[in-house]
Image (spheres, rainbow, N blue to C red):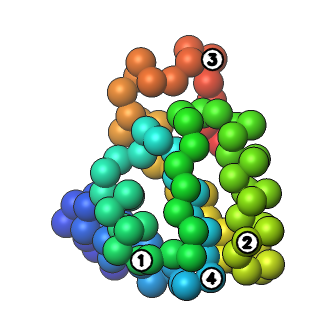
């Protein structure tokens, strides 16, 4: 598939993957197109964690495991690429996985 923009990519890519059993967990610094795609998909649970706050992410993953489907395929963490973020939003020594 070829999409004309990041917005079109997220709107076309995420909603088919997200079901009524999915927990969608997103970094607060994600681009608005990711938030819009998640909202369009209507997951069972939506949550946003503080930028690079891995402790908060772990808490939200645990909550999603308790309240949403037990199948790991129904829990999504959405993160966009570092190069599309302002450099100042990441610690100098941060490395993307």
Image point 44% across, 77% down: which residue? 42
Residue 2 visible to the viewer: yes
Marks 2 and 3, how far apart in space? 35 Å
Determine which residue is flagged by label 1: 41
Q: Which residue is mark 3?
A: 93
Give the image location of residue 22, x and y in percent: 60, 76
Q: Is residue 51 left or right of residue 87?
A: right
Identify the residue shown where x is 35% and y is 47%.
31
Could you tell which of marks 1 and 3 lies nearer the N-terminus? 1
Q: How far apart are labels 2 and 1 at the CA level?
A: 18 Å
Quadrant (top left/top right/bottom left/bottom right) for the N terminus: bottom left
Q: Mark 1 vs mark 4: which is more N-terminal? A: 4
Residue labelled with disc 2: 67
Q: Is residue 81 visible?
A: no
Q: Secondary structure at mark 1?
A: helix
Q: CA distance from mark 1 to mark 3?
A: 35 Å
| For discs 1 and 3, the disc positioned in front in the rendered view | 1
Q: Residue at x 76, y 47 (%)?
A: 58
Q: Is residue 64 left or right of residue 11?
A: right
**Around disc 4, counting alpha carbons within 10 Å, would you say few (fewer than 14), some (14 to 19), or many (20 or more)?**
some
Q: Secondary structure at mark 4?
A: loop
Q: Residue furthest left?
A: 4
Question: Which residue position holds label 4?
Answer: 21
Mark in front: 4 vs 2: 2
């Amino acid at each position: 598939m070829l999409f004309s923009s990041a917005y079109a990519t997220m709107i076309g890519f995420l909603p088919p993957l997200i079901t009524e059993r999915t927990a969608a967990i997103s970094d607060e610094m994600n681009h608005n197109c990711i938030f819009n795609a998640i909202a369009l998909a209507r997951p069972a649970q939506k949550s946003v964690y503080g930028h690079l706050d891995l402790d908060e992410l772990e808490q939200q993953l645990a909550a999603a495991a308790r309240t949403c489907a037990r199948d790991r395929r129904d829990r999504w963490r959405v993160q966009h690429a570092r190069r599309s973020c302002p450099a100042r939003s990441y610690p100098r020594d941060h490395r993307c996985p």
